[in-house]
Amino acid sequence: MAYVIKRYSNRKLYDTQESRYVTLEEIEEMIRAGKEIAVVDAASGEDLTSVTLAQIILENERNHRAALPTAFLHQLIKHGEAWQDFVQRSMKSSLEGIVSNQREMERIFQDWASRAGWGIVAPRVDAKRDGGEPDADRLREEVSTLRERLRSLEERLERKKNQAK
């Protein structure tokens, strides 16, 4: 479910889940943390998500944190909606490819880990879809277990090296 952010006529942004006003930077952080954001006009209910996300990108550009090539921006304006549709389709396809590659790498790692006798299950890339944030205590315990197994493997490797001498 998307986080609903209401945009008021005074340009203030209100996070309805957290019951507080937020900045564009905080919305950017939410998105980077994996939250789905929906921005709506408080009075009309109009969807302002695309406009707000574009504003975040432009703010990053102005602060030189991102670098969209000028030629690309010129082409985007020059060719209007046709170009924008092409860019949207291309970006969607690229992102789907990235997610697919991440899942494939996860599968390969799990297969490799099980063959190595580690018997671990790596956290899924899309774990947050299952109903919320991963449990921090569970993750700490898993990291601790992995460290212990790594230490054990290192000790076994060292013993085998010493035996080979």
Image: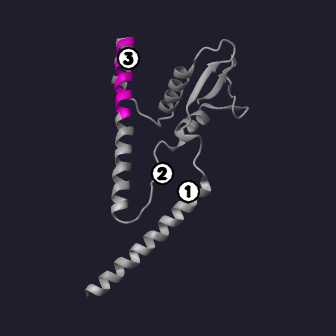
Mark 1 and mark 3: Cα distance apart in space:
40 Å
Dominant SS in magenta: helix
Q: Which residues are magenta?
A: 81-96
State left or right for residue 160 relative to residue 150. left
**Residue 78 at x, y = what percent?**
36, 13
Is any atom of residue 127 visible in this view? yes
Q: Which residue was labeled with disc 1?
A: 139
**Amino acid type indicated by mark 1:** Leu
Q: Residue at the location (33% across, 23% down)?
A: 71
In the rendered image, which quarter contains the N terminus?
Answer: top right
26 is higher (above) or lower (below) than 53: below
Label 2 secondary element: loop
Mark 1 is surrounded, within 10 Å at the Cα level, by few (under 14), some (14 to 19) or many (20 or more) other residues, namely few
Which residue reaches farthest left? 165
**Residue 7 at x, y = what percent?**
66, 21
Q: Which residue was labeled with disc 3?
A: 85
Mark 2 is surrounded, within 10 Å at the Cα level, by few (under 14), some (14 to 19) or many (20 or more) other residues, namely few
Q: Earlier in the sequence, mark 1 or mark 3?
A: 3
Asked if marks 1 and 3 touch (Cβ < 8 Å), the reply is no
Q: Which residue was labeled with disc 2?
A: 123
User: Of circles 1 and 3, which is in front?
Assistant: 1
Q: Nearer the viewer, residue 22 or 128?
A: 128
**Residue 158 at x, y = what percent?**
35, 80
